[in-house]
Image: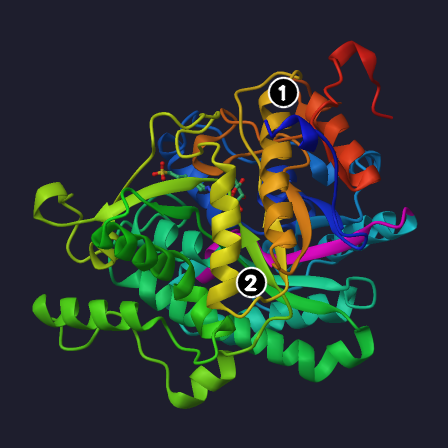
Amino acid sequence: TPPAAELKGRKFPHDFIWGIGTSAYQIEGGWNASGKGESIWDHLTHTYPEKIVDQTNGDISSDSYHQWQRDVQMVRDLNVHVYRFSISWTRIMPGGYMNKVNNEGIRYYSDLINELLHYNITPMVTIYHWDLPQRLQELGGWTNPEIIPVFKDYARLLFEMYGDRVKIWTTINEPWHICEFGYGVDYMAPSYNYPGIPNYLCAHNLLKTHAEVVHMYRDKYQQLQKGKIGITMDTSWMEPKTDSDDDREASERALQFYLGWFAHPIFSKRGNYPQIMFDRIHNLSKEQGFTRSRLPEFTADEIRRIRGTADFFGLNSYTTKRVTKNDHNNSKNFPVPSFSHDMGVVEDQDPNWTGSGSSWLKVVPKGMYNLIMWIVREYNNPPIIVTENGVSDNGGLADYGRVDYLNSYLSAILDAIEDGANVQGYTYWSLMDSYEWKVGYTEKFGLYHVDFNHPNRTRTPKVAAKVYAQICKTNTIDWTYRPTLDEFQIN
Ligand SMILES: O=S(=O)(O)CCCN1CCN(CCO[C@@H]2O[C@H](CO)[C@@H](O)[C@H](O)[C@H]2O)CC1
């Protein structure tokens, strides 16, 4: 909690954009409703339920496929300007290809967009939030360059269908998680566990895909539709464990590997992958007996084609890690080759940091300030939208831990703004409790509670929903505002 002087009334810029976020696989359910095709998350959770902590899946989840009007009501009650949601590729094109388009799916998102606009809420669409068509994964998914033209066809259809009404687009959510957690280790679908090679192929194709979609939007749609398009990347803040040179270098190296991998090709003056990644992976690949670097190389034309392909820097960040150099005295035996071995750091968390409902998520607001100022310096103060930030617990409506997280992380973001960072908006994660990927329904991120044991998936506002609604209405942080459950009805 800040000093008494700052308890009330810290104001955000008058034009600051407030929002709330969700993603298709996590909230919709209707996994095979009205012609929807199988995604890699449908496939993973149906084929390997043991890979999910509570052996659940998103077949129904929060049932937003049927409850979307209630969802829009909840968004309205939060007084936000923007609703960030993603479109399910297989609800639009069941097999991923353009040869079969599902009109029921087209209509679902059109109805949602119209409902949002009816209540003056701006739709912010994520084109891809991890739910790849399973049929495309059977061709190698993101490791196969075939995905570039196929994804472009999918994005073109969305621009054609919704671009008259959708004015903020994000191509892809969290490339790092898609490529390293999906194709490097087996944390997420498609759950490869093939360290150090397919993750870099995935990233190479993903960056080219992103660039082709942005060029298409800019060449064919942006003049007429007047929207913005960007990408959302993610990292924790990487705090040096001590102020030794080794630890400070480890911190910088970790940020280049986690964030620079995707941000440097798009947002840096030079473009291309970060030099430290290029050098380390090139040298290690040679030592390991590979004839070429495991990090694919862009041609000069590709570097130019990818550089500058974003109107804003979408940032997802939740927490902080401590890092030290991975050497003989604290060496961790990472698989060789692997992303972690290439990066060469050991991560941990300070046991004194406040915890949450997730083991990886500690509450360290200063880390958000440090990360934003690092991006300001590294990429020449790009327009940033914090597209995801939030905290988990294990349930309950009296979520005062979430109230404290919200106030402290927003204070850190406001500190960064007051120190010159061009942060233009914030979409809190998440609107409601939903499917939390590998941990199923065991960790809750929602401002609204969802009753997963009831067929109606009843939504109930938590205390933090009321606090966030107040922040969005007044544009102000007020630490003294801590409503009790019985004293408020949000609607
Ligand atoms: O202990 S470990 O480090 O081995 C496992 C880490 C597990 N990760 C942590 C990061 N998390 C954030 C990315 O996930 C983002 O954040 C939200 C909350 O997770 C998700 O609901 C969103 O869909 C996603 O965009 C995804 C799961």
Name the front one of labels 1 and 2.
1
Q: Residue at x 91, y 49 (%)?
A: 118
Of residues 299 and 251, the one nearer the viewer is 251
- Asked if the residue at label 1 sits under 8 Å from ligand 1, the reply is no
Which x, y percent locates residue 111?
Answer: 83, 50
Amino acid at dot 1: Asp
Q: Is there a contact, CB below 8 Å, between mark 1 and mark 2?
A: no
Is residue 60 at all visible to an observer of this figure?
A: no
Amino acid at dot 2: Gly
**Is residue 124 within the magenta segment?**
yes
Q: Residue at x 83, y 63 (%)?
A: 165
Q: Is residue 11 above or below residue 478?
A: below
Which x, y percent locates residue 276?
Answer: 28, 68
Q: Quadrant of the C terminus?
A: top right
Residue at the farthest bottom position = 301
Q: Is 246 on the left or on the right of 429, as rendered?
A: left
Residue under pointer 2: 96
Which x, y percent locates residue 426?
Answer: 67, 48
Q: Is 459 on the left or on the right of 377, as rendered?
A: right
**Circle 1 residues within 10 Å: few <14, some 14–19, many ≥20:** some
Residue range highlighted in magenta: 119-136
Of residues 268 and 52, the one nearer the viewer is 268
Q: Earlier in the sequence, mark 1 or mark 2?
A: 2
Residue at the farthest right position = 118
Residue 399, numbered label = 1
Q: Quadrant of the N terminus?
A: top right
Of residues 321 and 46, the one nearer the viewer is 321
**Is residue 284 within the magenta segment?**
no
